[in-house]
Amino acid sequence: MPTIDVSAALVFREGKLLITQRHAEAHLGGLWEFPGGKREPGETFEQCLRRELVEELGIEVEVGALLEEITHEYPERCVRLQFFLCILPAGEPQAFGCAALAWITREQLGEYSFPAADARLLGRLRRSSELWSA
């Protein structure tokens, strides 16, 4: 089974984290996720993330440190995700390429359903108050 490379952003602002909802007809439709998308041939994960966030949310970010890398096998595909800490210097995201978006607190993480691949990162986010102070 081929592996799909995905780059995702962790954008914190005033104690909240930006999440997006997948379109109902997409793979894992209706679930919430961290904004980003599939890496194109020849792109770095960072380049992919910048492109995807412009397309999906209309924002430009500064891509920072790689926080987590996860490989997860679903029955129909394998994904390798790289999650980067990002800074949103200006602008307000809009749901151009997703069903919805939300800014949530650490306490609200459990109120949203995420793909299974995000489970380890979600646990880390629940335990780490330092990330939320950005």
Image (cartoon, rainbow, N blue to C red):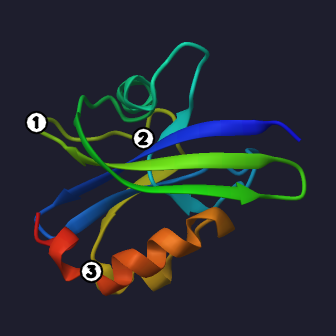
Which is in the foreground here, disc 1 or disc 2? 1
Looking at the image, which residue is at 37% across and 30% down? 46
Residue indicated by mark 3: 128
Tag 1: amino acid: Ala
- Residue 48 position within the rendered picture, expressed as x and y whole percent measured from the top left: 45, 26
Q: Name the residue carrying label 2.
A: 95
Where does the C terminus fall, quadrant-wise? bottom left
Note whether 12 is above or below 96 in the view shown.
below
Location of residue 34 with respect to 40 vertically, above or below: below
Residue at 21% in and 59% down: 12
Q: CA distance from mark 3 to mark 1?
A: 25 Å
- Please, what secondary structure does the residue beneath circle 3 have? loop
What's the residue at 70%, 37% (across, down)? 4
| Secondary structure of residue under mark 2 | loop
Q: Which residue is mark 1?
A: 90
Callout 3 amino acid = Ser
Front tag of 3 and 1: 3
Residues under numbered marks 3 and 1 in contact, where contact means CB atoms less than 8 Å apart: no
- Callout 2 amino acid: Ala
Left/right placement of residue 68 relative to residue 89 reads right
Quadrant in which residue 92 is drawn: top left
How crowded pointer 2 is (Cα within 10 Å; few <14, some 14-19, many 20+) is rated as some
Outermost residue toward the top?
A: 42
* Badge 3 or badge 2: first in the primary sequence: 2
Q: Which tag, 3 or 1, sits closer to the chain's start?
A: 1
